[in-house]
């Protein structure tokens, strides 16, 4: 009887072990299924028109305090858009965004919630502090517009290739790989670029110039390529760095220079004959030329918003009279953009600067005016706030005082 019971217990143990083995196998299969599902959900990064299209595609997201790097990484993998978070930024800071919006708007809002800016360089969205983001774009523009390079050197810099690396990659090794593939020798790389370990990344085909700019720029560096394109050296970005462009002076060059100095107070501006030469960061040039320095290249919810150029026959705002206008408790940004559209005006708003003052895009605003010209209306919206509103014809610029 005892032996029978022992056999029953042993058989029960065997059955239990069999059940546990099956449970374990199911658990392993579920884990594998999850991993395989994640891998299959990942989308290869795209470039060109496909990249621009994906940036405008509507996506839904809820971050719920997720770390910044994780939130950006998930968006990048799921939608096939390369996103680079500056190494100088704390990747673990929590970010908040819930809702549905174009992908680029989501990225810009996530960046903005961390006090950062998102800008586009070729087919990568770079996320970093405003100054560093603008510097990256400016360095890239200077390299692209450099006409002193030989045809051989220029061909190497403009060669387009993808690049990817695994977790814990060393930036010096990545830079060395880029140079070797292009038949270029580095000088001073070990001394200029400190040891660091980077998370995995996958970028689509881009020019060598832009790849080098994104990598070196995170160390405050650019590069010098020898005239024959055979050697390259990392160099610090000067404190007075800027891109030089010229603009037509028009009929009153002095007045236009004064206007430029108001729009870009940090720029170096000089009137020579019928041209105005400006050395400035790219964001300043965008402001002077009426382009929006956002990742989407438009007023897509970024730190600086610029609506489209007004038609040539648009009526100056000081000549448009408003008999009566009543708007109750509506978000600030849609109000401004609605007014600009109705008045056929161009709206330029420094949203990053306003945010630093505590003025959010979704700030609830009411307007009740009568017998007022359109130019005064925009100023009236901010009458009790430390904000400067400049109106020039059909162009409205809004920035912190």
Image (spheres, helix red, strand yellow):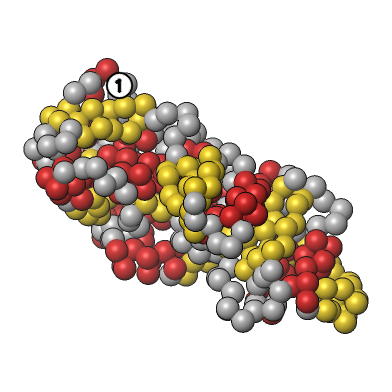
**On screen, 136 above or below 311?**
above
Q: Residue at x 50, y 64 (%)?
A: 298
User: Which residue occupies the extreme front position in the image?
Assistant: 273
User: Which residue occupies the extreme top position in the image?
Assistant: 191
Q: Is residue 164 left or right of residue 116?
A: left
Specify the quadrant that holds the C terminus.
Answer: top right
Residue denoted by label 1: 192
Q: Is residue 211 among the parts visible in the rendering? A: no
Residue 85 position, x and y percent, is: 42, 42
Q: Is residue 167 left or right of residue 243?
A: left
Residue 132 position, x and y percent, is: 47, 38
**On screen, 248 above or below 15?**
below
Label 1 CA crowd tier, 10 Å (few <14, some 14–19, many 20+) = some
* Front position in the image: 329 or 305: 305
Specify the quadrant that holds the N terminus.
Answer: top left
**On screen, 123 above or below 152?**
below
Question: Element type at marker 1?
Answer: helix
Residue 217 position, x and y percent, is: 37, 35
Q: Is residue 382 among the parts visible in the rendering? A: yes
Q: Kindly indicate the quadrant of the structure image that contains residue 13.
A: top left
* Front position in the image: 306 or 10: 306
Residue 166 position, x and y percent, is: 24, 39
Q: Residue at x 8, y 38 (%)?
A: 183
Q: How many marks?
A: 1
Q: Residue at x 27, y 39 (%)?
A: 212
Q: Residue at x 42, y 28 (%)?
A: 238
């Amino acid at each position: 009887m005892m032996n029978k019971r022992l056999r029953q217990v042993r058989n029960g143990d065997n059955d239990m072990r069999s059940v546990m083995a099956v449970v374990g196998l199911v658990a392993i299969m579920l884990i594998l299924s999850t991993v395989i599902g994640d891998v299959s959900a990942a989308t290869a990064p795209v470039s060109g028109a496909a990249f621009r299209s994906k940036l405008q595609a509507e996506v839904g997201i809820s971050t719920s305090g997720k770390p910044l790097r994780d939130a950006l990484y998930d968006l990048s993998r799921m939608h096939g858009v390369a996103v680079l978070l500056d190494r100088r930024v704390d990747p673990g800071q929590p970010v908040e965004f819930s809702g549905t919006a174009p992908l680029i708007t989501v990225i810009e809002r996530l960046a903005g919630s961390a006090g950062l800016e998102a800008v586009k360089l070729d087919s990568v969205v770079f996320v970093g502090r405003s100054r560093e983001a603008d510097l990256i774009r400016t360095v890239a523009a200077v390299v692209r517009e450099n006409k002193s390079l030989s045809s051989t050197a220029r061909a190497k810099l403009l060669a387009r290739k993808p690049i990817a690396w695994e977790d814990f990659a060393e930036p010096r090794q990545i830079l060395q790989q880029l140079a070797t593939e292009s038949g270029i020798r580095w000088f001073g790389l070990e001394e200029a670029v400190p040891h660091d370990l980077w998370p995995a990344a996958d970028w689509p085909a881009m020019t060598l110039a832009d790849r080098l700019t994104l990598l070196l720029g995170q160390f405050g560096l650019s590069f010098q390529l020898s005239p024959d394109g055979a050697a390259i050296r990392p160099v610090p970005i000067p404190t007075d760095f800027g891109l030089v462009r010229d603009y037509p002076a028009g009929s009153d060059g002095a007045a236009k220079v004064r206007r430029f100095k108001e729009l870009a107070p940090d720029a170096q501006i000089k009137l020579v004959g019928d041209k105005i030469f400006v050395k400035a960061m790219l964001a300043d040039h965008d402001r002077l030329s009426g382009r929006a320095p956002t990742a989407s290249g438009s007023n897509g919810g970024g730190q600086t918003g610029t609506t489209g150029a007004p038609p040539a026959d648009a009526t100056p705002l000081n000549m448009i009279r408003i008999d009566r206008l009543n708007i109750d408790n509506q978000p600030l940004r849609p109000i401004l953009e609605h007014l600009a559209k109705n008045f056929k005006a161009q709206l330029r708003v420094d949203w990053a600067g306003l945010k630093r003052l505590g003025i959010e895009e979704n700030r609830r605003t009411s307007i009740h005016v009568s017998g007022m010209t359109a130019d005064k209306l925009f100023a009236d919206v901010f009458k009790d706030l430390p904000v400067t509103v400049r109106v020039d014809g059909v162009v409205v610029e809004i920035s912190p005082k």
